[in-house]
Structure formats: structure tokens, C-alpha cells
Image (cartoon, rainbow, N blue to C red):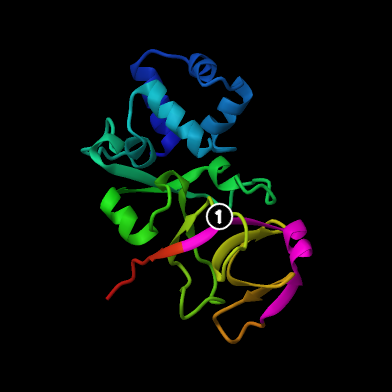
Amino acid sequence: MGMMQRVEELLKRKDRSQASLARELNTNPQTFSAWMTGRNQPSIPMVLKICEALDVSPTWLLTGRDDQFQRSPEAEGFVRIYQADTDAPADPMKQSMLKETPAVKMMQVNNRWVQRYAGSGDERSLAILSVHGDSMEPTLKDGDSVLINTMVTDVFTDSIYAFTRNRDIFIKRLQRIGDDVRVISDNPRYETYTVDYDQFEHRHAILGRLVSVITARPL
């Protein structure tokens, strides 16, 4: 059962209509209908609003499974980090696109984990992306999940960044050299190239700086 099927089930249990929920969410019936039929998906903030309106946890709505921190994990020292569906349509030049695209996964971690793997950044600015391809091997492998700090929207230090170009998302090592940006793939099979910084800003949007890799590889 998918997320919106669970929403439909809850509406039946509570004897509520789709129109009444759409009004409570301050969205139009056409948009809500598109969510229910699978033509589109609600954004992460909207998922949270749906959870509040129906009095369920995001864990249950996304996965169908309950969690012991259902009511207020933040109050117990836990935070939720969402993985955006980067295949969903979005404006590729909006740096806020990760917060406007649907969530496909969620992980719940405690503050100690955040401090260890994400440094001192605000946990509300963290997001998860999937690595596609081998251009960053051996540092990053195809299928890895990476944690990024979305508060970083400029190339201010040499590091690995997630950024958009056209309608694609890239994860590359970026190096600021004067008025230029060097785009580096750790895999030597891929060529390093340099772009004028103004041109880079015009054609790209920094989504965030990579802070850690979340691996799940079989032994």
C-alpha cells in the first residue's frame, strides 16, 4: 500500500472527504486529486502537514510502520532526515528544490549521530541524495546515499557538492580557483574541467555540500 492509499484509508476511517482535507491543507482539489491518483506527489513539507491533519507519524505514512517516537521525536532528542525524489519534476535552478520535491525515504537519527556525521550544522538543513554512476569512485560508489548540508549554496571551500545543471543533479568535487571553478571527478576516467565562476553560477545551482556517506553494502 502506497502513501496516498494510506491517506485514503484514513479518510474513510475518519469519515472525511478528500475535499475537506484539501481545504485544511490549503491546496486546491485538482492538486490533491493528482496526489491521490499518483500523477504527482506532495512535497516534504506537505507530507508533514498531512500527518498533522490526520494525526499520524511521517514514518507510518511513508512506510506503513509505526515508530516508538511517533508523537515528537525531536523532543526526545531525535530528528528525521528525508531523501528527496530527485526524479520528480522540479525547477532545476531553485536551490530549495530538495524541500519541494516528494520524499521517497526517511531516516530517524539521534542528535549524537547528527553531531558525529554531520558536524555542527543545523539538522533541519540536512537532506539525503542517492549517488548515480561511477564518476566519483572510489570515494563514492553507485547506489551510495550521501548526506548533504543544504545551507551551503556557494562554493566557498574545496569540497564535494551536489548541484544541478540543466535538469540533472551532479555530485562532484568543486575547487574554487580565483574567478574559476574546477569540476573534478575522483574517477580518473572522467576529465576535469574548469568553468568561469559567473558562468557556473548562471548555469548551476548548488544544492548543498556533502558531509558524510551513508553506506549499506553487503559483506
Q: Could you tell me the amino acid type at mark 1?
A: Val
Residue at 38% x, 31% y is 6
Q: What residue is pinned by disc 1?
A: 152
Which residue corresponds to the image point at 43% horizontal and 44% vertical from the top-left? Answer: 124
Q: Residue furthest bottom?
A: 188
- Locate residue 13: give its quadrant: top left
Q: Secondary structure at mark 1?
A: loop
**Are there few (<14), some (14-19), or many (20+) residues within 10 Å of tag 1?**
some
> Residue 109, image x and y in percent?
30, 50
Check the image and report above or below for 58 versus 49: below
Q: Position of residue 33 (x, y in %)?
A: 57, 26
Q: Quadrant of the C terminus?
A: bottom left
Q: Is residue 9 left or right of residue 95?
A: left
Left/right of residue 106 with respect to residue 205 in the rendered view:
left
Which quarter of the rendered picture does the N terminus lie within? top left
Residue 141 at x, y percent in the picture: 46, 74
Which range of residues does the magenta coloring cover?
A: 192-210
- Residue at (70%, 50%) from the top-left corner? 93
In the shown orientation, is residue 201 left or right of residue 16? Answer: right
Residue pushed farthest front? 178
Residue 199 painted magenta: yes
In magenta stretch: residue 38: no
Q: Decide: is 15 above or below 50.
A: above
x and y percentages locating residue 30 in the rendered image: 63, 24
